[in-house]
Amino acid sequence: MNIIQNGQTERILITALDENGDFITGLSDVLVEIQRTSDNYYLDFNDNTFKASGWATRQETMTELYYSYSPGSYYYDFDTTGFSDDEYFIRVTSATAENSPYEGYLKVGGYVDNIDVALSTIKTETDKIKYILGLSQENYRIFSPLYNSSGLLTSGTIRTYQTATDCNNNTNVLASYTITATYSGTNMLTYKVVKAWVEYLL
């Protein structure tokens, strides 16, 4: 089974052979049909619509690829633009070819392809992970803590770092946050952590 993104074109390609296993050129009876498996509708090639019945062209004649250099090869380009994410059953038949029929499935969409994501987007997501790790107390330090008369923290500064060495040396700060907290007696009423500034590591 092949898997492609929605909107891509899948080239359906077969090779027609005779009883001796030789390539057959010049065929006009190599026909492709495409069924959408979620509802068993077939593609009407006449208007490019999947239907339960009433097709004008349920099977399309495939094109010979290049009889001189690729003898016996026939193709159809299935453009999935406008179709749903789904699984499609594909069958190719030929009354002449001895190795007919040819069958397979094509899965369209339903997955994330990060290869197509811009590098700038990947960098942004990586930066976010750095901050999450920092606030999970990885390479994390608290500076200038202040406490009330009950010994409860009321303010301070959090700094996060990309590496343990930077954390130990307080160098190359990744991000800094201001802590503020209020209490009623010993019960905390509010607790706030606000990013003060950020310094990217280049």
Image: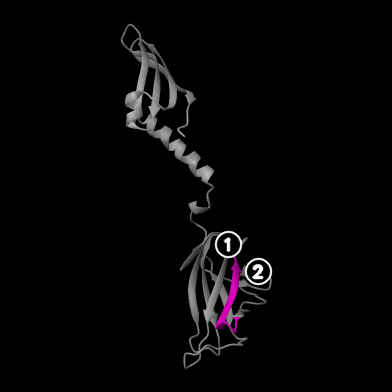
Determine crowd level at label 1: few under 14, some 14-19, many 20+ residues with C-alpha closer than 10 A. few
Q: Disc 2 residue type?
A: Asn
Single out the mark in the foreground, 2 or 1.
1
- Label 1: which residue? 8
Q: Residue placed at 59% from the left, 81% from the top?
A: 31
Give the image location of residue 78, x and y in percent.
59, 69
Question: Please, is residue 49 above or below residue 119 in the view?
Answer: below
Mark pair 2, 1: CA separation: 15 Å
Q: Main secondary structure of the magenta part?
A: strand
Residue 78 included in the magenta stretch of the image = yes
Instruction: Indicate which disc, 2 or 1, sits on the residue closer to the N terminus.
Output: 1
- Residue at 64 percent across and 68 percent down: it is 49
Q: Where's residue 79, x and y in %?
A: 61, 66
User: Which residue is identified by label 2?
Assistant: 48
**How many badges with numbers are in the image?**
2
Looking at the image, is 57 positioned above or below residue 193?
Answer: below
**Would you say residue 52 is visible in this rendering?**
no
Dot 2 surroundings within 10 Å: few (below 14), some, or many (20 or more)? some
Secondary element type, mark 2: loop
Q: Residue 83: where, in percent of width, then height?
A: 60, 62
Q: Inspect the image, locate mark 1, and give the three-letter code of the amino acid beneath it.
A: Gln
Q: Which residues are magenta?
A: 66-80
